[in-house]
Image: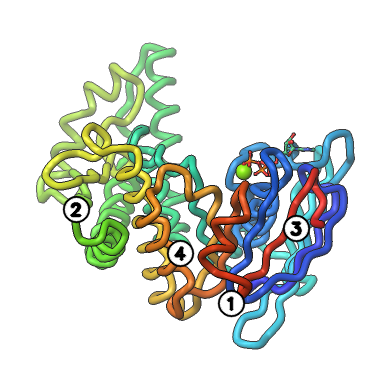
Amino acid sequence: MYLDKIYLLQFKNYEEADISFSDKINVIVGENGSGKTNLLDAIYYLCLSKSAFQNLDNFNIFHEKEFFLIKGNIIENEKKHEITCSLQRGKKKILLVNKVPYEKMTEHIGRFPCILISPNDTELITDGSENRRKFFDGLISQTDSKYLEQLMIYSWALKQRNSTLKLFAEKKTFDPSWLESYNQKILEIGKFLAEKRQEIIFRFIPIFEKYYQILSRDQEKVNVFYETEALKDDFEQIFANNLEKDLFLQRTNKGIHKDDYKFVLGNFPINKFGSQGQQKSFVIALKLAQFTLSKELKNHSPILLLDDIFDKLDDKRMKKLLEIVSGNHFGQVFITDARSDRALSFFGENVHIFQVRKGKIL
Ligand SMILES: Nc1ncnc2c1ncn2[C@@H]1O[C@H](COP(=O)(O)OP(=O)(O)OP(=O)(O)O)[C@@H](O)[C@H]1O
Ligand SMILES: [Mg+2]
């Protein structure tokens, strides 16, 4: 699967651009602030119907313009799909595949898989558990639509339960029957989701370890541990025992929304003891494993977007990474770099280089 062409109109700092890509390695070079990351984000938008960096869709419209439009042709098994994503200020986003809209936007997720590796990724290690859950939820959702659907119902039930707990506090009242249907959903769906998480992590770990070993040339061992209470035999009881605390804190304190994934380097947590380069290698290996697993489950290669990945990697790790992504296992890859010499010295002339300046592809 690869993106053949993209057309941008008033998207971020691109007033208008029309670009054809290579189906293998594309390197985007340009000064800071020229529009390299924005171009990757436009590709991300087409695949996942949202920005990787900007939660507010409106902020992606070129300053003081009224709308943006992104149009791209994705070729999958020699069949062309035209994807159009547009947004007018203050209106609903419109997404069309071959001119047909979706009934639900979530149907688009996973249809054209795409994986981004960016400098922000180390937040996966350094920040709270929510980021890690999001990463693994994203990984599973892109390959399992039932998981995404159930996850959305779970989030809805959790929100309703928390609102009810708040209402009890406000009204100084309590009626357990108001919580019953939410409790049931949180327990049943939570178990389903935890089982899926465990299943995927089981397949994920060996792939992830292999990538880390290649990057570190076998010098360091890593691991990921999935931690959940939802699969304990007595979880229903644990959940029920927490009611008093839930009422006091006005939120639900037990359930898969509290799960975490522990990231370990050697025998120690990487967030506390890993160097910046080790942390960076760790998240790159996580994303490469996401790529391989997604490819195994969906039978085609996701598009890989590598944004400013060279920073903090030593020359040996950088070379290993470029060897991995330019190998046959990987499909179309986009790499941004403020300098052109690194890509040129590795790939030589066999690579498509795009020079960006102030929102224009030269
Ligand atoms: N909605 C918008 N309208 C116009 N310009 C925008 C909009 N959003 C962001 N920009 C501009 O886009 C530019 C940043 O682009 P981008 O993040 O792609 O740069 P970059 O080439 O990746 O730079 P770096 O090397 O620093 O990562 C900034 O100049 C910013 O002002
Ligand atoms: Mg950038």
Q: CA distance from mark 2 to mark 3?
A: 43 Å
The quadrant of the picture occupied by the N terminus is bottom right
Q: Nearer the viewer, residue 162 or 315?
A: 315
The answer to whether mark 1 is within 8 Å of ligand 1 is no
Q: How many neighbours does mark 3 have within 10 angstroms: few (below 14), some (14-19), or many (20 or more)?
A: many
Element on which disc 1 rests: loop
**Residue highlighted by disc 1:** 1
**Residue highlighted by disc 4:** 322
User: Residue 128: percent from the left, percent from the top?
Assistant: 35, 33
**Residue highlighted by disc 2:** 220
Residue at image x 28%, y 58%? Answer: 212
Q: Which mark is residue 85?
A: 3
- Which amino acid type is shown beneath numbered disc 1? Met
The answer to whether mark 3 is within 8 Å of ligand 1 is no
Label 4 or label 1, whichever comes before in sequence order: 1
Residue at image x 37%, y 24%? Answer: 165
Side (left or right) of 253 relative to 305: left
